[in-house]
Image: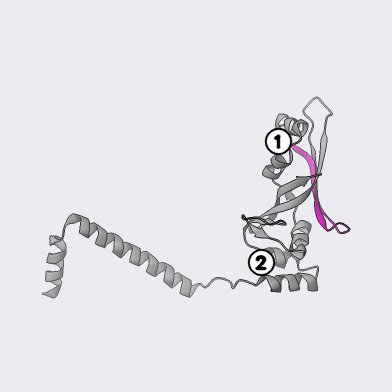
Amino acid sequence: MAKDNILRKYKETPEGLRGLLELGGLMLLIISIFFIFYIVFPGKEKIPEEDIVQESNQSEENYKEVINSLPSGQVNFYSSNEGYELTLAEYEAVCKNTKIVTQRSIMGAHITDIRAQKLYKDNGNNLDSSSVVWDSLANVCIVEYVLEAVHGTTDTITVIGEAKGFLNTGIDTRVYFIKNF
């Protein structure tokens, strides 16, 4: 009997109010499901930055652990509103484990070098070679790449700069910002 009264009152309510009740019920169901998933599958605990620095200073072979502890996205070795700011130990670890130079960083490095920009566009955005190396004397990450010559010419350009920003994809790290010399 009570069930029939509730069903009758529900059918008598205006269409707009019923839609809101249905939407509220759906939202409550979704939130409940995510809450259950959160309880059943808790995420990894975040490691404080002080612990990361101590680990990296203890052993130079723990570079992979340091990189895995960094947040995904942009990581920088300069103060910025965007991205995570690296410590010197993290900067070294990221540099030693980075092999990929992104097209964004190359285009940014060519902003002031019109000749390199033109060659890069003319050759189909191809690099002949690239390297990311840690300079332990200056404590900087050096990026060097050679732009491939256009077919039929031998004109190549070597660009050298300091990697100041990286992109942590969760799988690997990539050079994201190059400061030219």
Q: Is residue 140 magenta?
A: yes
To which residue does mark 1 refer? 125
Label located before the other in sequence (1 or 2): 2
Image quadrant holding the N terminus, namely bottom left
Instruction: Name the kind of residue labelled 1 in the image.
Output: Asn
- In this rendering, the count of numbered labels is 2
Q: Position of residue 10 (x, y in %)?
A: 16, 64
Left or right of residue 22, residue 44 in this image: right
Using the rendered view, name the quadrant where residue 119 is placed: top right
Q: Amino acid at mark 2?
A: Ser
- Magenta: main secondary structure equals strand
Element assignment for label 1:
loop
> Which image quadrant is residue 130 in?
top right
Q: Position of residue 101 (x, y in %)?
A: 73, 47
- Image quadrant for the C terminus? top right
Q: Residue placed at 12% from the left, 61% from the top?
A: 12
Picture coordinates of residue 45 (x, y %)?
A: 59, 73
Q: Is residue 120 above or below residue 34?
A: above
Q: Is residue 116 above or below residue 69?
A: above
Residue located 71% across and 70% down the image = 52
The crowding category of the residue bearing disc 2, from other C-alpha atoms within 10 Å (few below 14, some 14 to 19, many at least 20), is some
From the viewer's side, name the closer residue of 45 and 81: 81
Identify the residue at image location x=77%, y=27%: 151
**The magenta segment:** 124-142
| Mark 1 nearby-residue class (10 Å; few <14, some 14–19, many ≥20) | some
Left or right, 29 with respect to 46, comes to: left
On the picture, is 161 further left or further right than 172? right
Label placed on residue 69: 2
Query: Is 104 part of what is drawn in magenta?
Result: no
